[in-house]
Amino acid sequence: MFEEHLICESELESFELSARPGTSVYSKRDDAFSFGAVLANLFGLPGGKDSGEGTETSEPTAETDGNDGGTSAPQAASTVTPKNGTSARFKISNNKKVKCVVDVSLTPIDREQGGGGATAEHPPMSLAETSKLLEIPPHEHRFVTVFFAPAAIAKFAATLRAVVRDGSDDKTRELRCELRGEGALPHVTVETPAFVDEATSSPTVTFPMTPLGSVSQKRQITLRNDGVLPAFCRLDYALKTAESHNKRSPITVIGAGVTTEIAPGKYLPFTTFRRLNAHTRLTLSFLSLGTAKVFDVTYEPREEGDDSLQVVLAVKSNAFETRTIHIQGSGYVPDVLFENLNHSFPGSLKFNDGPVGSRMVETFTLSNASRKNWRFEFPDFGDSQKNENETSKAFQFTPRVGHLPAGTSTTITATFLSRSETLLGVDSENPPLEVPVKLVPVKSYFEGAHLEYLEKR
């Protein structure tokens, strides 16, 4: 009867947790068949244009299902298959030497408890018209087709009953099987950003203040599918910000505007042992591992001031999952700029790899973009009393201290000489070395002189 489906010895609940979503299976222990989780049609009216009804399929017969033992005419008729649902075929065989007529019925179980959308005219589980009455020749078989098209987020069940007319053998005259299924929707959660703005009640990506012309460190938007169905989702720029984005918005979401499939979470079985009264108890548990999709967000301010962008998360077949994600950043005009660096990431300097004890030299430019005069000072990594970090002692900057009048620049020479094996900026366990530069404003000779003269008078 279940030759087209998986058959398991365990309970359905245990098997469904570890099985791939959408897998139909028959459980010998429960004597029940499960359609698994199926997309619920919450947004279409039964029988309407969006309900999914209207796709015609022909019921398989002995001539098309591989049965070469009979020459009976096919059971002609076409049935209507719901687009949003699924179907399953069950094999009914006649092992006797005479033809039999089988009446097939499907009776819902606790339909009132099954949730909305289950009506007498449009039940979640229904029989194909050609499956309600079967005429099976001797030593042949026919297939019963059952459709499952849930219209609510709930669990449904029905009893499939096949009765042979005028059957005299109690063992073979009637067949019963419980059918189960679950209506579900794709579910996507915003894992990052974790910060939710109280004013907008929306997840918010916040960039630090970023100098004009530079690119801030990437932020990420992580979407996770913790449901049981595959989720097709996309991030789109909101209508309010789409026009500004067309004018080259400083905020960019890499991957926006493209529909992405996120696989559902999986469940891995593991076994735990617990000793209880000199007996070992075996426990089977399941750990959920939801899959995720990561979108990188970059920010490159071009004007001084605050910038913002709104992106909308849309999940196919689930309007309840639509959410707005806010992205904020602020650009400013820096006083001093690091220019002519040899690394693609702004504000970073990279030394080539080399043997221990070799001297490597790189140069860059320190420019004063403001109208003030500045005194700069790089840290003295060679001072053992002030610096206890052995790694930073390998770096030296020349000149270490100097002055930058307004609108001028100077060349800085950076030297890397390590006496031991050093790894910096390779991975999260070996982050790059951050070098703070101290800036102190310096008054020019004539700046404020007239104010001091007036105060003395």
Image: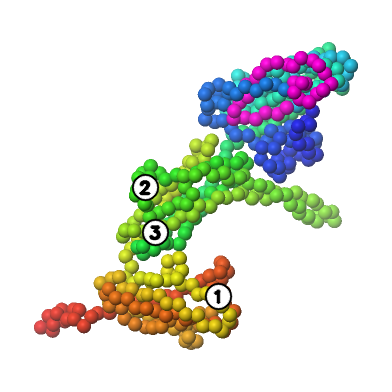
- Please tell me how crowded label 2 is: few (under 14), some (14-19), or many (20+) other residues with Cα within 10 Å: few
| Earlier-in-chain disc, 2 versus 3 | 2
Q: Which residues are magenta?
A: 61-89
Residue 167 drawn at (x, y percent): 85, 15
Asked which secondary structure carries label 3, the reply is loop
In the image, residue 55 lies at what x, y percent? Answer: 60, 24
Q: Which label number is shown at residue 246?
A: 2
Q: Does the stretch in magenta take in 86?
A: yes
**Residue sitting at 69 percent across and 33 percent down?**
35
Quadrant housing the N terminus: top right
Residue closest to the eye, 279 or 401? 401
Label 1: which secondary element = loop
**Is most of the magenta stretch helix, strand or loop?**
loop
| Residue 111 visible to an observer of this rendering | no
User: Relative to 121, does residue 212 appear above or below in the rendering?
Assistant: below
Q: Which of the two discs, 1 and 3, labels the residue nearer the N terminus?
A: 3
